[in-house]
Image: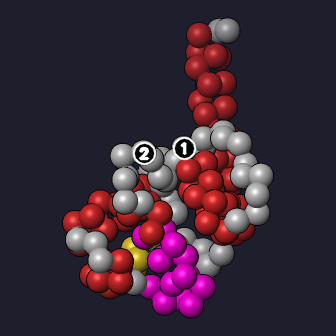
């Protein structure tokens, strides 16, 4: 049996007022809990953008390609890729990485499905516990 575990974090922050692609991408990633203040050089954001470009071109990337393209160490890339995979946003296929889907709207739809599925499982278990405790 394969157990898939994803850590999905949703942070409720104010949407950018001004229409600016970089601000909106940063807001989207921050709202998904992908980027944090400890990432001073915005490595995760830059990796996410590289993977987004690769998804549009339907061209998965190796960690070495990402590292070379962004002038980052392979270790830094792997650290952030692991985090993105843990959130269910990035998948690993044939030693290459790609976004789970090829556009952001579909990505949000997939995350929403994950959240709904998880809430359904939580509701079912809570009901079982309530029944067991006769609440």
Say whether residue 121 is left or right of residue 48: right
Mark 1 = which residue? 9
Front in this rendered view, residue 134 or 105: 105
Q: Residue at x 77, y 52 (%)?
A: 17
The answer to whether residue 74 is above or below residue 87 is below
- Start-end of magenta stretch: 47-60
Q: Quadrant of the C terminus?
A: top right
61 horizontally vs 10: left or right: left
Image position, residue 121 (x, y; %): 61, 39
Is 112 a magenta residue? no
Q: Where is mark 2, residue-wise?
A: 37
Residue neighbourhood size for the residue with mark 1, other residues' Cα within 10 Å, grouped as few (<14), some (14–19), many (≥20): few
The vertical placement of 30 against 100, above or below, is above
Measured as percent of width and height from the top left, residue 132 is found at 59, 15
Q: Residue at x 51, y 84 (%)?
A: 54
How many neighbours does mark 2 have within 10 angstroms: few (below 14), some (14-19), or many (20 or more)? few
């Amino acid at each position: 049996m394969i157990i898939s575990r994803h850590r999905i974090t949703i942070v409720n922050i104010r949407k950018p007022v001004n229409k600016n692609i970089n601000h909106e991408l940063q807001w989207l990633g921050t709202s998904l809990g992908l980027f944090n203040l400890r990432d001073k050089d915005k490595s995760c954001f830059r990796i996410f953008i590289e993977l987004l470009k690769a998804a549009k071109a339907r061209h998965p990337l190796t960690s070495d390609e990402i590292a070379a393209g962004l002038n980052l160490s392979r270790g830094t890339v792997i650290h952030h890729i692991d985090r993105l995979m843990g959130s269910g946003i990035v998948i690993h296929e044939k030693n290459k990485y790609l976004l789970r889907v090829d556009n952001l709207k579909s990505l949000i739809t997939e995350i929403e499905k994950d959240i709904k599925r998880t809430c359904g499982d939580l509701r079912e278990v809570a009901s079982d516990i309530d029944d067991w405790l006769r609440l």
